[in-house]
Amino acid sequence: MKWVSAVICALFLTSGFDSLSQTKSTTWYATANGNFYMPVGNRSKGIYPIVGYDKKTSPKILLGGVGFGAAMLKPLSKDFSFKAQTNFSKHTYWEEELMMRDYVASSIGYFQSGSSDYGLGLAAMIHYFPVESFSIGAGISAQATVISFSRTPGMYLGAEIDPGFVVNRYYKAVVPMVPVELSYKVNRLLFNVRYEAGFTNRIKGELARYKTDKFSLLTFELGFLIK
């Protein structure tokens, strides 16, 4: 929770830069994103497509990481701005393959289940503008998981298997991240590509002694100027 507090506090620290940004006003954007959950050092998990198709699954259309949120850009000087943002997103990834069995316990093959984390992301970054419309930024961020569950897709092998859902209760509520972002502004639109690196184990409790689960996020984001 200390990382979340640090991100929130950073939003208030920018008030001291008002004298440096009198010629430019603070801008606000509503954002939508597509994202990839990228497992780190875990070969049993895989990257899930943002949008995909698999004829063996039910539903056949796969929808991966998506989200929405808001971003604020506050000028600090001619070349630097403070950026704060928050988003509520779904991060989806493939789990390790599972052996599926029918109602008489006969094997019907190995299948991969998908898992999704729903949560809130917070980020505070300093952006440098080498030119007016393009910037690069870095800072601190945190991902807070509201709920996480695994789903085994329904398969068609002579008979349909109803999908099942299991809530994952062994993940930490908050994981600190380090974001690096490229941004491009044109008219009322803001395009962002952000990579958030995770370095800590997200497994909590006694299980963390035996299992390590780290991840990073690659996010493609579109912002619409609202103020």
Image: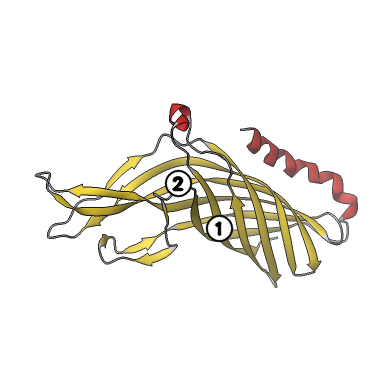
Measured in 3D between alpha carbons, the distance from the residue under mark 1 to the one under mark 2, in whole angstroms, is: 15 Å
How many residues crowd mark 2 within 10 Å: few (<14), some (14–19), many (20+)?
many
Q: Secondary structure at mark 2?
A: strand
Point out the tag, 1 or 2, that comes first from the N-terminus: 2
Which numbered tag is attached to residue 218?
Answer: 1
Residue 117, numbered label: 2
Instruction: State the residue in front, 87 or 127.
Output: 127
- In the image, taking residue 100 as reference, residue 134 lies left or right, namely right
Q: Where residue 9 sits: x, y (%)?
A: 72, 38
- Asked which secondary structure carries label 1, the reply is strand
| Residue at x 19%, y 52% (from the top left corner) | 161
Q: Where does residue 68 sit, x and y in percent of width and height?
A: 54, 56
Q: Is residue 94 left or right of residue 155?
A: right
Measured as percent of width and height from the top left, residue 197 is found at 60, 50
Say which of 213 and 36 sits in front.
213
Q: Please identify the quadrant where the N terminus is shown.
A: top right
What type is the residue that disc 1 sits on?
Leu
Mark seen at residue 95: none
Find the residue positioned furthest to the left: 104
User: Which residue appears farthest toward the top when viewing the image?
Assistant: 206
Question: Nearer the viewer's eye, disc 1 or disc 2?
Answer: 1
- Say which of 15 and 104 sits in front: 104
Quadrant of residue 218 within the rendered picture: bottom right
Residue 140: horizontal and vertical position, in percent? 68, 46
Quarter of the figure that contains the C terminus? bottom right
User: Residue at position x 27%, y 48% from top?
Assistant: 98
Q: Is residue 62 left or right of residue 197?
A: left
Badge 1 density bin: few <14, some 14–19, many ≥20, Cα 10 Å? some
Q: Residue at x 23, y 48 (%)?
A: 99
Which amino acid lies under the numbered mark 2 shown in the image of this protein?
A: Asp
